[in-house]
Amino acid sequence: MFTTLLLKELRLLLLSPKYIATFTVCVVLLLLSVFVGIQDYQATADQVAEARRMDEQLLLEATSWMGLQTRAYREADPLQVFVAGTHHDIGRYTPIGRREIDLDQSPYMEDTLFALFRFLDFAFIVQVVLALFAILFTYDAISGERERGTLRLTFANAVPRVMYLLSKLAGAWLGLVVPLLIPLALAVLLVLVFQVPFGGADWTRLGLLLAYALLYFTGFIALGITVSALTRQASTSFVILLMVWVVFVLILPRVGATLAAQSVAVPTVAEVESQKEAFASATRSRFIDDMRTTLATRNAAMESMTPDERDAYLEANEWEWMQEQDRQRKEMDAEIDAHSRRLNEEVRVRQAVQERRALAYARLSPAAAFGLAAMTLAGTDVGQKARYEEQMDAYRTDFMRFVEEKSGNSGGGIQIRLGGAGSGGSIGGGDDESLDLTELPRFEAAELSLASYINPALVDVALLAVYAFLSVASGFVAFLRYDVR
């Protein structure tokens, strides 16, 4: 009996005009989104490779360790083809030198049109479009049958209500899986044709992403049948479901972010930069004043000396003075850097609290839970920027330590030339020979394990399972009490 009911549901669904429209839309949107994602991934990978070649050439042409800089780049992740997430919002690289780490030049800075309309990807299609299709397929599953009189006719026979509802759920679910799986299979073929470097872990993550998508719209299918079983007219069911879709998909995620922003104040970038600049300016001014006082004292001590005595005095003390000034400069840079780190850490703590609250509010929506799970699985979640900046900051420490050691060993530090009274110092260092860069540290982003992608998403996946279970259970309770007349 169950098979008969299921085949009836599938036949009605597959032969309906809305099914053909749904299948066509899914094929076009999915293939278009994946094609654009592949082009974007390849463009990002090519830009990073070219920029690295240019940086390497500049390093080879450098003749002094002083002021040596390079750049660290954020790698493109193959799964961004399906889930763009924050990829286009955060910077692609940061200079590695004396300035602090700050990912700069996001793709939206160049493609402002995409910043206006955002990228279309697999996660968005499932999150928004398929959820709407689930409503369109199920809003009249029960109330529509009652209005047409087929519900009373069906239960004139000995049909268990549980079996009937299961056939409704299974039919709608299988009907929506086909418009998803077929274009997704074609999308995977595109990935293979364009040779996007998917590894074993990447294919596993893609498979899990599909499982998350199936779990997500299972909840919406069950929700549609539940509301249909709570109403007497299909039109009423459709209006209620449309309102629920708007609230879950469009409103709740944004309200969560707004409430979190109001409850936790985070300084703006301009405010933080202003504080950093004020402290750095005051510290440098103090350093310059101290150096001027020191130079004046040394020049005063040489005023009564003969030229020969002055030359001998300079020759005996100049190297020590140069080392002392270099030490003081390093202490100044370290003090400025430590202050910037403290400010950044304070901002990060506040942002973390704000982010946790925003995500907690947003997770009241299954659409937000799916979006967060998909981005976490793809590595394009909100933590992507912090992960890269932490690794880049550690690399910056190693890079600057290496450069400082080379500067000291090669005598490339600051050298002070003192003349007569009132004369200033001059800076020199380095020579015209190329540098030996064989031991120079290179930035390599740490490769995350599969568990590092999966474990953080378990909370959102569990929420999706809870939403789906509650929707299915509510549907059964509502239908068991439903008046089929």
Image (cartoon, rainbow, N blue to C red):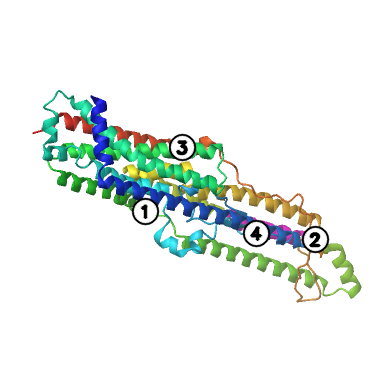
Q: Quadrant of the C terminus?
A: top left
Mark sitting earlier along the chain (1/4):
1
Dots 2, 3 in contact, CB < 8 A: no
In the image, which is nearer the foreground, mark 2 or mark 3?
3
| Disc nearest the viewer among 2 and 4 | 2
Identify the element where label 1 is drawn.
helix
- The residue at which mark 3 appears reads as 207
* Cα separation between marks 1 and 4: 36 Å
Instruction: Bin the neighbour count of mark 3 within 10 Å (Cα to Cα): few under 14, some 14-19, many 20 and up.
Output: few
Q: Nearer the viewer's eye, disc 2 or disc 1?
A: 2
Q: Which residue is mark 2?
A: 434
Instruction: Judge whether 238 appears above or below 91 on screen.
Output: above
Judge by depth and name the residue closer to the eye, 52 or 174. 174
Mark closest to the chain's N terminus, 2 or 4: 4
Q: Which residue is most to the top? A: 158
CA–CA distance between discs 3 and 1?
A: 35 Å
Residue 121 image offset from top left, x and y in percent: 42, 50
Q: Secondary structure at mark 3?
A: helix
Magenta region, residue range? 322-338
Disc number at residue 332? 4
Left or right: where 434 falls relative to 248: right
Q: Which residue is mark 1?
A: 261
Q: Nearer the viewer, residue 281 or 374?
A: 374
Q: Work out whether mark 2 precedes mark 3 in sequence or the reverse, and give the earlier one.
A: 3
| Circle 2/circle 4 CB separation < 8 Å | no
Q: Are marks 2 and 1 in contact (CB under 8 Å)?
A: no
Query: From this viewpoint, is residue 77 visible?
Result: no
Mark 2 is on which residue type? Ser
Q: Residue at x 58, y 63 (%)?
A: 280
In terms of image quadrants, where is residue 330? bottom right
For image coordinates 75% across by 49% down, the residue present is: 439
Q: Position of residue 254 (x, y in %)?
A: 33, 52
